[in-house]
Image (spheres, grey):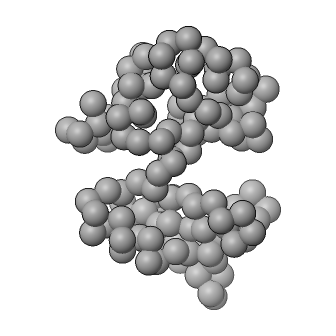
Amino acid sequence: MPYYIYKNPTSGEKTSIFMTIAEMERSSNADGSIELEGNLWQRDISAEIGSAQMGSCAVWPLKSDAAGVHPSQANEFRKDSMQRGIPTEFDKETGQAVFTSRSHRAKYLKAYGMHDKSGGYGDG
């Protein structure tokens, strides 16, 4: 399934989204932008091409819903991850885990007993 990179023009933050071409076309405005959580995000095609050439399909830092927590638990899990030796930040508004690299993500998932079935050989 293709992934698309979008940039928030206000904050400069980037996110990657996996979706089918049909889903992307349905959710996109005429200029290629989409609305996420009430904010308009512009598609960043140059980042998509650049990351594809580098052999990586993720944009770092990567925010993860699956490894995230409830927003009210962000500080608790940040402290717990530090105690486990894998300091991890969590978005205070969404609870998403913020990973800085593939190895950071792999170490965090292992420490918390999670497994990424889509992970590659280089993911730890």
Give me the residue at 61% from left, 33% from top: 89
On screen, residue 17 above or below 26:
above
Give me the residue at 72% from left, 63% from top: 11
> In the depicted view, which residue is nearer to us: 58 or 82?
82
Q: Position of residue 80 (x, y in %)?
A: 60, 14
Residue furthest left in the image: 121
> In the depicted view, which residue is nearer to us: 110 or 24?
110
Give me the residue at 48% from left, 22% from top: 86
Instruction: Locate residue 88: give its quadrant.
Output: top right
Is residue 35 among what the camera can see? no
Instruction: Locate residue 49: give its quadrant.
Output: bottom left
Residue furthest bottom in the image: 30
Q: Is residue 5 left or right of residue 34?
A: left
On screen, residue 65 above or below 11:
above
Q: Where is residue 51 in the image (x, y as percent from the top left)?
A: 36, 65
Point out the image quarter for the C terminus. top left
> In the depicted view, which residue is nearer to us: 29 or 105?
105
On screen, residue 18 above or below 80:
below
Q: Where is residue 120 in the image (x, y as percent from the top left)?
A: 25, 41
Q: Where is residue 16 in the image (x, y as percent from the top left)?
A: 50, 58
Q: Is residue 38 left or right of residue 9?
A: right
Is residue 33 among what the camera can see? yes
Q: How many marks?
A: 0
> In the depicted view, which residue is nearer to us: 40 or 107?
107
Give me the residue at 79% from left, 26% from top: 72
On screen, residue 122 above or below 60:
above
Point out the image quarter for the N terminus. bottom left
